[in-house]
Image (tube, rainbow, N blue to C red):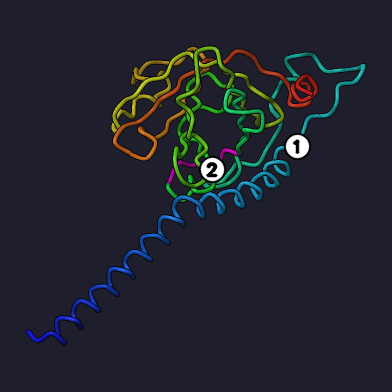
Amino acid sequence: MTADRVRAVVGVTGELLITAGVVIGLFAVYTLFWTGVETAGEQDDLQREFEAADPQPPEPTAQAAPPETALAPLEVPEPLPGDAYARMRIPRLGEDWSWIIVQGVDLSDLTRGPGHYPDSAEPGQVGNFAVAGHRATYGEPFAHLDRLEPGDEIRVERAGLEHVYRVTTSYITGPDDVDVVAPVPREPGAAPRTEVITLTTCHPRWSSEERLIVHGVLDGTASSTTSSGTES
């Protein structure tokens, strides 16, 4: 092989390596940054969708309804996959930590925000209300789920009611451990008697090798208007 041909081969190889580096760099920027921008825009749309479909209950009056009627959920449209479903707040993760949960846990659903397992319970219902979310990319809503401790609040708002759950436990398990979202977590076939919540995400943060699971139990329910007034 002549010197000119060697130089040509080296030049082409160098150009290919540079191109590959640029492509990899752009993909990294898209994965680490741009997916978060896209999800933030989706969350803005979902916030408006949630507020339009999940109206606040009327302010209490002197002739207020009995407590059991006042705490009945309002009628809201049945969400389709990817639609706004509920709003979640976790104070331990920051005062401004607030995400709209979508209906469904397909990949396309989770690019918009945390997703409600469709076959799991409704918020506040007896059974297991289960939610999955990304720990990295797409806004990484569950990036710091490992910071939750027993007793921490998980607040879920839907149909005019806000349900406050308290964290009970967290642990690491395998990706095939689907029983964590059973009506009674890790007890398939058991009949539920309490209201629980389960949050699932990948572990470690930049891997899907395992799953981080957080469980909690319902501590109380109030109207969204009453809860907001108390917090302000």
158 left or right, relative to 117: right
Going 31% across and 66% down the picture, which residue do you hit? 20
Within the magenta stretch, is there residue 68?
no
> In which quadrant of the rendered view does residue 56 lie?
top right
Give above or below for 149 relative to 211.
above
For the C terminus, give its image quadrant: top right
What label does residue 113 carry, if any?
2
Quarter of the image for residue 123 reads: top right
- Counting the numbered discs, the total is 2
Mark 2 packing: few (<14 Cα in 10 Å), some, or many (20+)?
Answer: many
Residue 172 horizontal/vertical position (percent): 34, 24
Residue 80: x %, y % from top left:
55, 46
Q: Are marks 2 and 1 in contact (CB under 8 Å)?
A: no
Q: Residue at x 50, y 21 (%)?
A: 148
Task: Looking at this view, name the residue that lies furthest to the front.
Answer: 3
Callout 1, which amino acid? Pro
Is label 2 or label 1 in front? Answer: 2
Query: Label 1's element?
Result: loop
Residue carrying label 1: 55
Q: Is residue 231 above or below residue 209?
A: above
Q: Earlier in the sequence, mark 2 or mark 1?
A: 1
For image coordinates 50% across by 26% down, the residue present is: 129
Q: Quadrant of the N terminus?
A: bottom left
Question: 109 or 167, which lies in front?
Answer: 167
Identify the residue at horizontal 65%, vertical 42% (top origin): 77
Residue 156 picture location, percent across and down: 61, 27
Find residue 196 and report its horizontal and vertical position in percent. 50, 18
Which stretch did the figure color magenta? 100-106
Q: Amino acid at mark 2?
A: Gly
Mark 1 burial class by Cα count in 10 Å: few <14, some 14-19, many 20+? some
